[in-house]
Image (cartoon, helix red, strand yellow):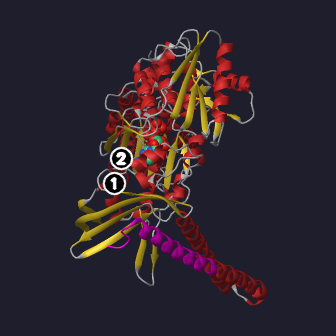
C-alpha cells in the first residue's frame, strides 16, 4: 500500500501539486498558441479577403470558430486545474477487487495523466467514487454502465486541503464523515450557498445519483440539504449524461431572484456552467403573453398576513384543492359536449344547405385539437363541402358568411370568458373576484393558464431536458397540472410542507405524487443547518416528530421582552452592535411583513444594513433586513426576529412565518417582542 503515513500523504500532495502545476503550464502554452494562431488567421483573412470566394470565407470562418472553441475549452480546463491546485482532493478509498487494487483519490474534478494512463484524481461523480459515500471499510460495490463491480474497501480517508495546504487528515475506520461534517457545519456562512461534495451523506447520495426516476420528489425538513442535493444532482446528471444534456438544457423554477442568486454559485463551483432560471410568475407572464395583470404570490401572502379576509381565504383554499382541478376537468368535458349549438337547424350558403350533423361530425373528427383551435379546420371542411356540391368557386361574401357563422355557434369564444363561466356552471359565482383595476387574483392565474392549455393549446418547453422545482409546497395541484403539460422532461421537485408561506394553498409530497404518479418520493429527516438548540426551539413552533437534529451544540435561543416598541428598537440596535463585534459573516433580521421590515430599516438606518424586498435581485452577506417569505431558502449565522408579540404572530400563516424565520439561523437566534409574547414561542 502506498502513502500509508501522514508524512507520505503530505509528500504525495506535493507531488500532485507539481503535476498540476505542470499541467497548468501546458494549458497556458496551449492557450497562448491558440490565441496567436487565431490572430494570425484573422490577419490572413483580412489581408487576403479580396482574393477569397464565398466558400473560402465560410471555410476560414469555420476554422476560426473551431479554434476559438478549442481555446475556450483550454481556458475552462485551466480554471479547473487552478481550483484543483488549491484543493486537489478531499477523500480517498483503496478498493480491492480480485487481484487488482485501486487507490482512489476523490476531488471535484478528474485529473489524469494521459501519457502515463494514470488517474490521479477521480471526479466525485465517477461511478467508483460513489463507494466513498456509500460504504465503510469492508465489502463494497459500485455500479458502472456495464454492470456491478464488487470488492472490498480496505482504507478510507478524508482530507481538508486549502490553498494547497493539508489542514487535517482523518482515518475513517468507523464513523462516516461525522467529524468533518461537524467542522463544516460549525463554520460561518459563506456569501452564497456552497458545495458539499466532501461530506455528502449516504441518503443524500442516493438522491443525487438516482438516474432512473422520471420525477423525483424530495420532501425534507428545514435544513436537510434539499436545495444542496438538488444542485448536486444536476451536477451529477450533467456528468453522467454529458453526451445528451448540457447546462443550457436544464431549467430551475425558483421562488425569487435573490434565491436564484444565492444558489447560483454551486454549479460553477462544481465545474458546470450557469443554469437558466425562471420564476413561476415569469412563466405565467410568458404563457399569458402579457395580456393580463395579476397579483403576485408575494402580494397574495402579504394580504393574508395583513388582513383576515375570510372570503379571500375561501377562494384560495378552494382553488388549491384537487376537487377544483377535477371540477375544471369536468367543466372542459361539459364545454366540449354542450357549448357548440346551431343558430338554426342548417346553414344555407351559396344556395345549398350544410346540414348540422355534418358540422358536428367534422368538429368531432378534430377531437385531438383544442376546441377553440378547431373552428378554422371545420370552416375549411365546410368550404370544401360547399365548393364540391356547387361545383364552383365561392365568392368572398359566401366565404365570409361561413367564417362568421361557424365560430358563432360556440357559446363563448375566448378563454377568459370561459374561465368566468366555469364559476357560473358550478353555481359558485362568488368564488371568482377580479381585483380593482382589472387585476387577476394570484389564485386565478394558473387555473386560467390551465384553461388556456385545454381550450387553445400552448407551446411546450421541449428544449428543457430536466426541470428543477424548489419550494414545491408553495404550488397547487393546478400549477403542477400546468407544469406537467408544459414540461415533458424528467423533474426534480423539492420542498417542505412545514415551510409554507400560505397554509391555505400548501402542497405536500403526497399531493404532488398524485399529480405525478410515476414519481418517486424521498423523505429527509436529518437537519444540518442549525444547532441542536435552535432546531429544538423551532420544533416547539411547528413539530415534526420524525425530525432528527444534528448533535451540534450552541447557545440557547434567547427571547427578550420589552415594555414598549422604543425599548425593543434599542435592544435590536444593541444586538446589531454585538453582531458587528462578533466573527460572524451574516445576520438576518427577519420580520413578518414587508411593512415592518421597511420601518425597522428606517429606524436602524445604519451603513452596512441592506433591505431585501421582492424587487431585490441579489444576495449579499452582512446584515439583511427582510421578511420570512423572502428569507425562505436562505441562511444566516445569526438571526434576530423582531416583533414576536402576541399581536403580531397569532394566525396559522403567522406560525408558518415564525417557523421559517427561526430555521434560517445556523448558530445564534434571538427573538424580541414588546408587551405580550406570541403564544407560538414556548416558555
Ligand atoms: N451533507 C452535508 N454536508 C455539509 N453541509 C450540509 C450537508 N447537507 C446539508 N448541509 C448544509 O445544511 C444547510 C442547509 O442546506 P440546504 O439549504 O440545502 O437545505 P434545505 O433543506 O434546502 O433547507 P430549507 O428548506 O430550510 O431552506 C446548508 O448550509 C448546507 O450546506
Give the main secondary structure, helix, strand or loop, of the magenta stretch.
helix
Circle 2: is it few (<14), some (14-19), or many (20+) Cα within 10 Å? many
Q: Which mark is residue 216?
A: 2
Q: Secondary structure at mark 2?
A: strand
Q: Secondary structure at mark 1?
A: loop
* Res. 587 in view: yes
**Magenta span has 7?**
yes
* x 31%, y 50%: residue: 175
In the picture, measured across the screen, residue 352 lies left or right of residue 59, that is left
Residue 90 found in image quarter? bottom left
What's drawn in magenta, residue-wise?
A: 1-29
Disc 2 versus disc 1: distance between alpha carbons?
A: 9 Å
* Res. 241 in view: no
In the picture, measured across the screen, residue 538 lies left or right of residue 581, that is left
Circle 1: is it few (<14), some (14-19), or many (20+) Cα within 10 Å? few
Q: Position of residue 372 (x, y in %)?
A: 47, 40
Asked if marks 2 and 1 touch (Cβ < 8 Å), the reply is yes
Q: Earlier in the sequence, mark 2 or mark 1?
A: 1
**Magenta span has 60?**
no
Q: State the quadrant of the N terminus.
A: bottom left
Q: Position of residue 62 (x, y in %)?
A: 62, 79
Q: Is residue 638 above or below residue 380?
A: above
Q: Is residue 405 above or below residue 206?
A: above
Indicate the quadrant of ligand 1 in the picture.
Answer: top left
Q: Which residue is mark 1?
A: 210
Q: Which mark is residue 474?
A: none
Q: State the quadrant of the C terminus.
A: top left
Q: Is residue 540 above or below residue 633?
A: above
The residue nearer to you, when weighing 118 against 62, is 118
Amino acid at each position: 500500500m502506498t502513502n500509508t503515513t501522514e508524512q507520505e500523504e503530505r509528500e504525495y500532495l506535493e507531488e500532485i501539486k507539481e503535476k498540476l502545476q505542470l499541467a497548468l503550464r501546458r494549458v497556458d502554452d496551449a492557450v497562448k498558441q491558440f490565441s496567436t494562431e487565431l490572430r494570425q488567421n484573422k490577419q490572413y483573412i483580412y489581408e487576403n479577403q479580396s482574393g477569397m470566394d464565398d466558400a473560402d470565407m465560410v471555410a476560414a470562418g469555420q476554422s476560426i470558430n473551431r479554434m476559438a472553441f478549442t481555446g475556450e475549452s483550454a481556458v475552462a480546463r485551466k480554471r479547473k486545474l487552478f481550483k484543483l491546485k488549491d484543493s486537489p482532493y478531499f477523500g480517498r478509498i483503496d478498493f480491492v477487487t480480485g487481484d487488482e487494487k485501486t487507490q482512489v483519490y476523490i476531488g471535484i474534478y478528474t485529473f489524469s495523466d494521459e501519457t502515463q494512463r494514470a488517474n490521479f484524481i477521480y471526479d466525485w461523480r465517477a461511478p467508483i467514487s460513489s463507494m466513498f459515500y456509500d460504504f465503510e471499510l469492508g465489502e463494497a460495490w459500485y455500479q458502472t454502465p456495464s454492470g456491478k463491480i464488487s470488492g472490498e474497501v480496505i482504507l478510507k480517508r478524508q482530507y481538508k486541503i486549502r490553498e494547497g495546504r493539508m489542514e487535517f487528515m482523518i482515518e475513517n475506520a468507523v464513523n462516516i464523515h461525522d467529524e468533518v461534517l461537524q467542522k463544516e457545519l460549525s463554520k460561518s456562512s459563506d456569501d452564497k450557498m456552497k458545495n458539499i461534495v466532501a461530506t455528502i451523506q449516504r441518503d443524500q447520495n442516493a438522491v443525487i445519483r438516482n438516474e432512473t426516476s422520471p420525477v423525483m420528489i424530495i420532501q425534507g425538513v428545514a435544513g436537510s440539504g434539499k436545495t444542496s442535493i438538488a444542485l448536486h444532482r444536476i451536477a451529477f446528471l450533467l456528468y453522467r449524461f454529458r453526451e445528451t444534456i448540457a447546462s443550457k438544457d436544464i431549467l430551475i423554477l425558483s421562488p425569487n431572484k435573490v434565491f436564484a442568486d444565492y444558489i447560483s454559485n454551486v454549479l460553477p463551483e462544481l465545474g458546470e456552467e450557469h443554469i437558466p432560471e425562471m420564476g413561476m410568475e415569469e412563466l405565467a407572464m410568458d404563457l399569458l403573453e402579457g395580456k393580463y395583470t395579476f397579483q403576485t404570490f408575494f402580494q397574495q401572502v402579504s394580504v393574508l398576513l395583513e388582513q383576515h379576509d375570510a372570503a379571500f381565504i375561501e377562494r384560495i383554499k378552494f382553488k388549491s384543492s384537487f376537487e377544483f382541478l377535477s371540477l375544471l376537468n369536468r367543466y372542459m368535458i361539459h364545454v366540449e359536449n354542450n357549448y357548440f349549438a346551431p343558430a338554426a337547424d342548417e346553414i344555407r350558403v351559396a344556395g345549398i344547405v350544410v346540414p348540422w350533423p355534418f358540422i358536428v361530425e367534422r368538429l368531432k373528427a378534430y377531437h385531438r385539437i383544442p376546441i377553440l383551435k378547431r373552428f378554422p379546420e371545420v370552416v375549411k371542411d365546410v368550404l370544401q363541402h360547399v365548393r364540391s356540391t356547387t361545383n364552383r368557386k365561392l365568392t368572398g361574401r359566401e366565404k365570409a358568411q361561413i367564417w362568421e357563422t361557424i365560430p358563432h355557434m360556440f357559446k363563448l369564444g375566448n378563454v377568459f370568458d370561459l374561465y368566468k363561466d366555469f364559476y357560473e356552471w358550478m353555481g359558485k359565482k362568488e368564488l371568482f373576484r377580479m381585483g380593482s383595476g382589472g387585476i387577476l387574483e394570484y389564485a386565478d392565474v394558473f387555473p386560467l393558464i390551465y384553461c388556456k392549455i385545454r381550450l387553445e393549446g400552448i407551446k411546450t418547453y421541449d428544449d428543457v431536458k430536466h426541470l428543477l422545482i424548489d419550494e414545491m409546497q408553495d404550488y397547487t395541484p393546478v400549477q403542477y397540472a400546468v407544469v406537467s403539460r408544459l414540461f415533458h422532461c424528467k423533474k426534480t421537485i423539492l420542498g417542505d410542507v412545514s415551510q409554507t408561506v400560505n397554509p391555505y394553498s400548501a402542497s405536500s409530497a403526497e399531493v404532488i405524487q398524485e399529480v405525478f404518479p410515476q414519481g418517486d418520493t424521498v423523505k429527509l429527516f436529518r437537519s444540518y443547518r442549525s444547532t441542536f438548540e435552535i432546531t429544538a426551539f423551532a420544533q416547539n413552533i411547528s413539530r415534526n416528530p420524525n425530525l432528527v437534529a444534528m448533535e451540534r451544540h450552541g447557545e440557547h435561543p434567547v427571547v427578550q421582552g420589552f415594555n414598549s416598541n422604543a425599548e425593543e428598537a434599542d435592544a435590536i440596535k444593541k444586538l446589531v452592535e454585538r453582531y458587528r463585534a462578533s466573527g460572524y459573516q451574516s445576520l438576518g433580521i427577519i420580520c413578518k411583513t414587508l411593512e415592518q421590515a421597511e420601518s425597522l430599516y428606517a429606524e436602524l438606518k445604519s451603513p452596512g444594513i441592506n433591505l431585501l424586498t421582492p424587487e431585490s435581485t441579489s444576495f449579499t452577506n452582512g446584515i439583511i433586513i427582510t421578511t420570512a417569505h423572502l428569507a425562505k431558502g436562505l441562511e444566516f449565522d445569526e438571526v434576530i426576529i423582531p416583533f414576536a408579540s402576541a399581536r403580531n404572530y397569532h394566525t396559522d400563516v403567522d406560525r408558518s412565518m415564525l417557523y421559517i424565520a427561526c430555521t434560517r439561523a445556523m448558530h445564534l437566534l434571538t427573538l424580541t417582542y414588546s408587551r405580550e409574547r406570541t403564544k407560538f414561542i414556548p416558555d
